[in-house]
Image: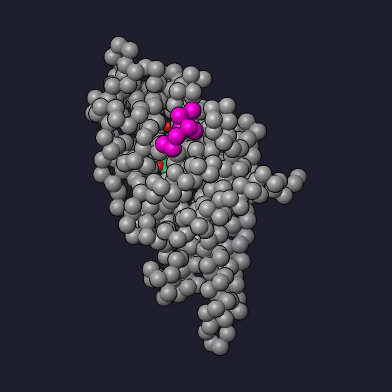
């Protein structure tokens, strides 16, 4: 087993680190206050091949392995997890096309995203169906060669700014997961309209909105997979996306450790740097070991996906473990900074607010434990 990164991975990691330091960190606090959508930063990340990383080279994309994508995401997230959530949501949203689409559909919808910068949004959750995906209500009625979509999606990242939406709907609500379908719907389709933008506690640079579908007519050629395959496409998408969420959490935790280490060496109490006290050292040590373990789980789940192997259990473990580590590390960072940590003059309160979302989105950590336990039972 070799834990060294090869030259290509090191180059990618350095590119992402430089991009985070030069383009993201200087504006992260301002975006946190304004909540302004960082479209220009997203475009630059796309130009460098740090976004839309799953589009294969055969379609003009960078076709990064998941391991490489995760290494990049950790670096970007160290700069700002809200901006990075906006970036990785593009990959989340293109996965249903990659995993459920035909060759023609991949060419039609993914190749243009490699050619020209486009924002994508993954529309799964609804006001009444977050964890319970099979309970979603957005209805697709077959009408000749079209489907007509009606309903509302909620908590949609990039929802207000997307050029392309991947949308999950049900043909028959009583059939639960067996009735679901996936569609690709471009912005501008009559009846599709972004709704209220959420005023969030953290990750305020990411755009989270309702998306309304009022008699949205979609040709059957825009259905991904067969009727009834929508649930499995959604699950496969989440299995593939969760390592990137875990990597994002590792980036937050790493930033918390870096800030805490620097502060603990400067800040004095009782005549010495607070980093000299074991109470503080133990928190720093716990952060460091959590980060290392979370990164290993993340890269293991990513590696499994790159081998074409089932990774539901490891992806859920990585997402759950890494996001819990991020929450603990950022909470301890605020503790180490004391009163200063609780103010907006220092960066750690933002990290703590940002980390909380990680335990909720792309499947709550309770749902991850459900997935892990079911996978254990499957044997
Ligand atoms: N891959 C392939 N198939 C799968 C699968 C997987 N990972 N998981 C389940 N399936 C199959 C099952 O084998 C079963 O198949 P059969 O009908 O052939 O038996 C079928 O799908 C139904 O599975 P379950 O009975 O396990 O389904 P369930 O209704 O009990 O729900 C769940 C399972 C794991 C709780 C699922 O609903 C889930 O993952 N919920 C969380 C949703 C989530 O993560 N949402 C995040 C939204 S995106 C977001 O937050 C991103 C953002 O904006 C930043």
In which quarter of the view is residue 164 placed?
A: top left
Query: Which residues lie in the magenta part?
Result: 111-118
Q: Is residue 314 visible?
A: no
Question: In x, y percent, where is residue 142?
Answer: 31, 16
Question: In x, y percent, where is residue 35?
Answer: 33, 54
Q: Which residue lies furthest to the bottom in this view?
A: 271
Q: What quarter of the picture does the C terminus occupy?
A: top right
Residue at the spot x=72%, y=49% of the render?
A: 4
Q: How many marks?
A: 0
- Looking at the image, what colour scheme do you see? one colour
Up/down of 264 relative to 80, above or below: below
63, 172: nearer the viewer: 63
Residue at the spot x=49%, y=42% of the render?
A: 46
Up/down of 322 relative to 271, above or below: above
229, 83: nearer the viewer: 83
Q: Can residue 33 be seen in this view?
A: yes
Question: In x, y percent, where is residue 270?
Answer: 54, 87
Residue at the spot x=56%, y=59% of the render?
A: 254
In which quarter of the view is residue 169 placed?
A: top left
Q: Residue furthest right?
A: 1
Residue at the spot x=57%, y=76% of the render?
A: 265
154, 218: nearer the viewer: 218
17, 234: nearer the viewer: 17
Up/down of 342 relative to 70, above or below: below
Question: In x, y percent, where is residue 215?
Answer: 24, 25
Whether 78 is among the magenta residues is no
Q: Main secondary structure of the magenta part?
A: helix
Q: What quarter of the picture does the N terminus occupy?
A: top right
């Amino acid at each position: 087993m070799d834990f060294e990164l090869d030259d290509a991975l090191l180059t990618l990691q350095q590119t992402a680190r430089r991009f985070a330091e030069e383009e993201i960190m200087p504006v992260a606090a301002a975006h946190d206050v304004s909540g302004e959508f960082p479209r220009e930063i997203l475009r630059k990340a796309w130009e460098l091949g740090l976004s839309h990383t799953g589009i294969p080279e055969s379609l003009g994309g960078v076709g990064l392995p998941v391991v490489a994508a995760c290494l990049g995401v950790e670096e970007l997230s160290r700069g700002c997890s809200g901006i990075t959530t906006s970036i990785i949501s593009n990959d989340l949203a293109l996965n249903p096309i990659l995993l459920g689409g035909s060759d023609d559909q991949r060419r039609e919808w993914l190749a243009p995203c490699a050619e020209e910068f486009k924002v994508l949004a993954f529309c799964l959750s609804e006001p009444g169906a977050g964890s319970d995906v099979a309970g979603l209500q957005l209805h697709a009625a077959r009408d000749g060669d079209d489907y007509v979509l009606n309903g509302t999606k909620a908590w949609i990242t990039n929802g207000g700014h997307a050029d392309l939406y991947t949308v999950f709907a049900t043909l028959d609500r009583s059939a639960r997961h067996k009735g679901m379908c996936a569609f690709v719907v471009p912005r501008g389709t009559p009846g599709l309209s972004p709704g209220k933008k959420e005023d969030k506690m953290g990750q305020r640079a990411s755009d989270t909105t309702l998306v309304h579908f009022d008699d949205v007519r979609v040709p059957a050629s825009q259905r991904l997979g067969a009727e009834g395959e929508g649930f499995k496409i959604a699950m496969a998408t989440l299995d593939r996306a969760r390592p990137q969420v875990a990597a994002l959490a590792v980036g937050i935790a790493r930033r918390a450790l870096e800030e805490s280490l620097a502060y603990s060496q400067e800040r004095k109490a009782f005549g010495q740097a607070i980093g000299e006290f074991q109470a503080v050292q133990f928190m720093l040590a716990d952060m460091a070991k959590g980060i290392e373990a979370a990164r290993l789980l993340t890269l293991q789940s990513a590696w499994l996906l790159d081998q074409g192997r089932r990774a539901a259990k490891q992806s859920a473990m990585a997402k759950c473990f890494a996001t819990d580590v991020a929450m603990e590390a950022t909470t301890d960072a605020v503790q180490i900074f004391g009163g200063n940590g609780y103010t907006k003059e220092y960066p750690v309160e933002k990290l703590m607010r940002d980390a909380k979302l990680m335990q909720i989105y792309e499947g709550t950590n309770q749902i991850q434990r459900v997935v892990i336990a079911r996978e254990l039972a499957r044997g």
